[in-house]
Image (cartoon, helix red, strand yellow):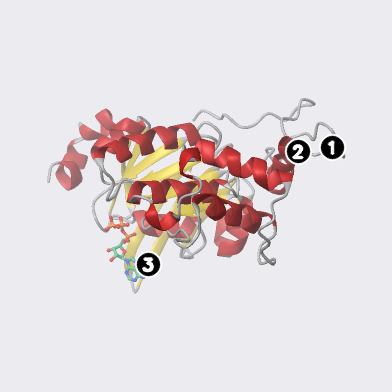
Amino acid sequence: MASPHLPISSADPYAVKSPGVYSLEAELADVARAQNRVRDPLAVTSALLYLDNITVSFDGFRALNALSLAIDEAEMRAIIGPNGAGKTTMMDVITGKTRPNEGVALFAGVNDLTRLDEAAIAQLGIGRKFQTPTVFDMHTVEDNLLLAIKESRAPFSNFYWQRTPFERERTDELLERIRMTDQRKRSASELSHGQKQWLEIGMLLAQEPRLLLVDEPAAGMTDQETADTAVLLREIAKTRAVVVVEHDMQFVRDLDVKVTVLHEGSVLAEGSLDQVSANERVIEVYLGR
Ligand SMILES: Nc1ncnc2c1ncn2[C@@H]1O[C@H](COP(=O)(O)OP(=O)(O)OP(=O)(O)O)[C@@H](O)[C@H]1O
């Protein structure tokens, strides 16, 4: 497996360049350091996310059955598979919502996800986007982002609408990244379904996750929104890992990334969409139906 881990050198990309002087870069460097983003020399794997032999049983039924999967830094992976294949359960294991009965789940080679709670895992830099957008409808687009920025910096603190220079710059940057600068003053309640999804992705990016888990982003989107979402996720995956669970094959094709097919709680096939689409077992259990 390729190991595009981050460099550890005197030219530390996360170094604070001018201590004492405000800069967005320096603020983000603190986030990276807090998430221990420079590769730990004790890491047992170069993969950012490493699942090995994960089994989850519900009353004897194996929702995950010896599942093994590795995701590299800044890799985007699409996960497909029939209903009940175990996709959601896998996301639940990664985020600490479900404890596996067996197996290894490591983040950044050192963090044992099976021993951490959901809050600690989020703090490590794993963000999860559920299928239904959860934005604050009564607030504007930019205030939704501001709330997420404030929450990521001082969880559970009192909320003040006044913005610091960091928050102003960060809001602008996130608006640009999700291509919603021209929508900033609109109430979230007026947005289309697709725009709400992008806004929520922006809110997750406010936490600077190293790994973003995205559950069926294309569901309910127009064709244009679906195509735009693929472009957005590809852009995001240049700087962080993204795992996308999706049923929409045109969307998966647009993502143009390695695909993992799950079936009955295990990996059935991996490869490009063309490769897995030609796999007879995959056709039999999923694509050909
Ligand atoms: N809490 C639970 N208790 C019992 N069975 C469960 C539980 N959660 C999931 N399952 C079962 O585990 C299997 C895997 O479910 P999961 O939701 O992970 O599949 P999925 O691939 O996400 O499916 P879908 O595409 O329909 O969302 C299913 O058979 C489901 O019924």
Mark 2 or mark 1, which has the lower sequence index? 1
Task: Determine whether the residue tagged by mark 2 lies in a helix, strand or loop.
Answer: helix
Q: Distance from label 2 to label 1 (Cα)?
A: 9 Å
Q: Which mark is residue 26?
A: 2
Amino acid type at mark 3: Ser
Three-letter amino acid code at the position of disc 2: Ala
The relative height of residue 67 versus residue 251 in the rendered view (above or below) is: below
Residue 27, by quadrant, is: top right
Q: Position of residue 241 (x, y in %)?
A: 51, 39
Q: Earlier in the sequence, mark 3 or mark 2?
A: 2
Residue furthest bottom in the image: 59
Query: In the rendered view, would you say 234 is above or below 260?
Result: above
Q: CA distance from mark 1 to mark 3?
A: 53 Å
Visible in this render: residue 63? yes
Circle 3: element type: strand
Q: Quadrant of residue 279?
A: top left
Three-letter code, disc 1:
Val
Ligand 1 picture quarter: bottom left
Along the viewing direction, whichever of 236 and 39 lies nearer the viewer: 236
Between 189 and 40, the one lying in front of the other is 189
Q: Residues within 10 Å of mark 3 (few under 14, many from 20)?
A: some
Tell me which residue sits at (69%, 41%) in the image. 28
Residue 269 numbered tag: none
Mark 1 neighbour density, 10 Å: few (under 14) some (14–19) many (20 or more): few
The answer to the question of whether label 1 and label 3 lie on touching residues, with beta carbons closer than 8 A, is no
Callout 1: SS: loop
Task: Identify residue for label 1.
Answer: 21
On residue 57, which mark appears?
Answer: 3
In the image, farthest residue toward the front: 185
- Evaluate if marks 3 and 2 touch, with contact meaning CB atoms under 8 Å apart: no
Q: Is residue 125 left or right of residue 266?
A: right
Left or right for 113, reference 85: right
